[in-house]
Image: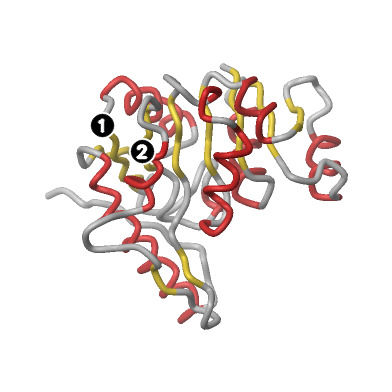
Amino acid sequence: MKIGILGSGEVGRKLGDGFIKLGHSVKIGTRDLSQKQITTWLHAHENGTASAGTFEEAASFAELIVIATRWDGTTNAIILAKQKNLAGKIVIDVTNPLDFSKGVPPKLAVGHTDSAGEIIQRTLPSAKVVKAFNIVGNPLFVHPEFTGGPPTMFICGNDQQAKKTVTDILTGLGWETIDIGGIEGARLLEPLAMLWITCYFKTNDGNFAFKLLRK
């Protein structure tokens, strides 16, 4: 599959690594193709499965698109990618609506009656938005290993087939997946990310993830 990633930060590059390991071709969209983190990432994947371009080029290239931008840059990234290039496609929303205006730890800028996931779905009404990968730090995206077994990735979205595709990707990356329903479920998942972030800042340790235990 051809996957386009909007965002060239650690989150986007780590997901790109994982997708390439699963055999997909990845194009990262960025505002600055000359930045060292992009040239280094491309150098690490010289087998032809990795490339970089503008947001528009990444979205046009892709069969599946990942939005992995900071929240304050998400709207602009979508504008630059052009809605027509995202229409009808699966869009994995990895964003969290974090407000860093008062320092760290950040606070949620959206919550209770709305969510970043819902805002992105409204912005892209013909896309199939699935919220995923937002409740854990990026070093654990690919094959997280814990003594208690694979952790749980909760996802949500309005399109069942899109969620099945995302679940298949998560399974390949070593995750258990639980679908909590429509995109409004992002109202739960984004505060869950804040719980992860709060624990991280309290312990200065990001080597943990959530798991749903069954009796």
**Residue drawn 52% across the image and 46% down it:** 141
Image position, residue 188 (x, y; %): 25, 56
158 horizontally vs 208: left or right: left
Q: Residues within 10 Å of mark 2 (few under 14, many from 20)?
A: many
Where is residue 23 shown, x and y percent of the image? 61, 20
Q: Residue at x 40, y 57 (%)?
A: 209
Q: Which mark is residue 121?
A: 2
> Picture coordinates of residue 132 (x, y %)?
40, 42
Picture layout, residue 111 above or below residue 49: below
Q: Quadrant of the N terminus?
A: top right
Helix, strand or loop at mark 2: helix
Q: Earlier in the sequence, mark 1 or mark 2?
A: 2
Q: Amino acid at mark 2?
A: Gln
What label sits on residue 30 in the rendered view?
A: none
Protein image colouring: secondary structure
Q: Which mark is residue 158?
A: 1
Check the image and report above or below for 200 versus 54.
Answer: below
State left or right for residue 76 relative to residue 194.
right
Q: The residue tagged with tag 1: helix, strand or loop? A: loop
Question: Looking at this view, is 87 or 145 the one in front?
Answer: 87
Residue at x-position 69% and y-position 29%:
27
Answer with the quarter of the image where residue 2 lies: top right
Badge 1 vs badge 2, beta-carbon distance below 8 Å: yes
Q: Nearer the viewer, residue 35 or 78?
A: 78
Point out residue 86 in the picture as x, y percentages from the top left corner: 50, 26
* Quadrant in the picture for residue 77: top right
The quadrant holding residue 28 is: top right
